């Protein structure tokens, strides 16, 4: 096995990128086969839409899909290419209470901007010549919304805990390990520029969700997560922000909107503009402090031998 690992260590950045994406593609296929078997078994051998299935089966399929497509490829890649996977993905860096506080403030302050961008993104229309493509995109968005609505319809205590675990915790952890922990680090080396690597990863992160009507706010979120990972040199902070953002969706739908129906983004110039301005100002200040203290954290990491 050591000989196998030694051979992978000589692979360049492009080879690492290809391998990671190949693992993810294979995981997608294997996960698809596994979920298809589960679907057929539940439906008695008949084809059935996932939306029509029971709550528990949908959650199981969700978990299996992300584990095979993102988590297992991350484990396989980091094990083959890196001596210490946890160190490579920055999972063993000491924690900072300051960064913990800044992460929470960032999640809250960025919401008005995400809502603003999301509102105009949802108004996106394609030229008449691309009507078929637009109908496909709309159908995909409607199916995703219907699926999420069914998951959120279970507003029992156990249902809320399960939703927070699957939609917020599992999704955030798995996606951060894959996108920020592995993919972003590879793209930064290939591009030779941190900013290019971060934004390329954010674009791929958004595209993989197959939702053009939420594309731009998701790119912004992905970029913020990427910068947090770079500034803190710790994957746990980008995971925390990702988790809190996803958890906010679950909690807002059930306790603020009091509905399992996914609410479209809204923006009223008169009533929402003050929140957008204040939120953006706080966001900029928070980002400033993240960036300001990164030198201190990097120095601490170097002294601890973690970089």
Image: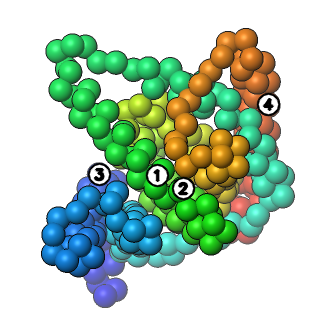
Q: Which mark is residue 14?
A: 3
Mark earlier in primary sequence (3, 1): 3
- Which residue position is annotated with label 4? 282
Labels 2 and 4 touching (C-beta < 8 A): no
Q: Which mark is residue 152?
A: 2
User: Mark 2, residues whose alpha carbon is within 10 Å: few (<14), some, or many (≥20)?
Assistant: many
Q: Secondary structure at mark 1?
A: helix
Q: Is residue 11 above or below residue 232?
A: below
Q: Secondary structure at mark 2?
A: helix
Labels 2 and 1 touching (C-beta < 8 A): yes
Image quarter hosting the C terminus: bottom right
Nearest to the observer: residue 214 or residue 19: 214
Q: Secondary structure at mark 3?
A: helix
- Which residue position is annotated with label 1? 148
Mark 2 → mark 4, Cα distance in angstroms: 31 Å
Give the quadrant of residue 267: top right
Q: Nearer the viewer, mark 3 or mark 2?
A: 2
Mark 1 → mark 4, Cα distance in angstroms: 31 Å
Task: Let me know if residue 258 appears in the view.
Answer: yes
Labels 3 and 4 touching (C-beta < 8 A): no
């Amino acid at each position: 096995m050591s000989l196998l690992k030694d051979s992978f260590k000589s692979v360049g950045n492009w080879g690492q990128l290809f391998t990671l994406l190949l693992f993810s593609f294979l995981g997608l296929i294997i996960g698809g086969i596994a979920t298809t078997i589960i679907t057929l078994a539940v439906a008695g051998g008949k084809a059935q839409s996932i939306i029509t299935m029971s709550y528990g089966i949908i959650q199981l399929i969700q978990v299996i899909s992300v584990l095979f497509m993102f988590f297992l490829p991350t484990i396989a890649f980091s094990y083959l290419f890196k001596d210490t996977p946890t160190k490579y993905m920055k999972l063993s860096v000491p924690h900072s209470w300051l960064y913990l506080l800044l992460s929470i403030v960032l999640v809250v302050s960025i919401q008005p901007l995400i809502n603003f961008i999301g509102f105009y993104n949802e108004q996106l229309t394609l030229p008449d010549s691309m009507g078929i493509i637009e109908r496909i995109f709309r159908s995909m968005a409607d199916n995703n919304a219907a699926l999420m609505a069914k998951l959120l319809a279970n507003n029992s205590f156990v249902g809320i805990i399960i939703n927070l675990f699957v939609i917020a915790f599992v999704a955030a952890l798995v996606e951060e390990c894959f996108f920020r922990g592995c993919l972003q680090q590879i793209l930064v080396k290939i591009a030779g520029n941190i900013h290019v690597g971060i934004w390329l990863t954010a674009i791929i992160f958004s595209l993989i969700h197959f939702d053009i009507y939420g594309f731009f706010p998701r790119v912004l979120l992905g970029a913020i997560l990427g910068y947090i990972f770079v500034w803190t040199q710790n994957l746990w902070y980008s995971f925390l922000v990702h988790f809190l953002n996803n958890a906010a969706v679950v909690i807002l739908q059930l306790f603020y909107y009091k509905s399992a129906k996914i609410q479209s983004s809204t923006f009223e110039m008169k009533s929402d503009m003050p929140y957008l301005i204040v939120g953006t100002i706080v966001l900029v200040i928070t980002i400033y402090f993240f960036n300001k203290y990164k030198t201190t954290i990097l120095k601490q990491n170097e002294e601890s031998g973690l970089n």
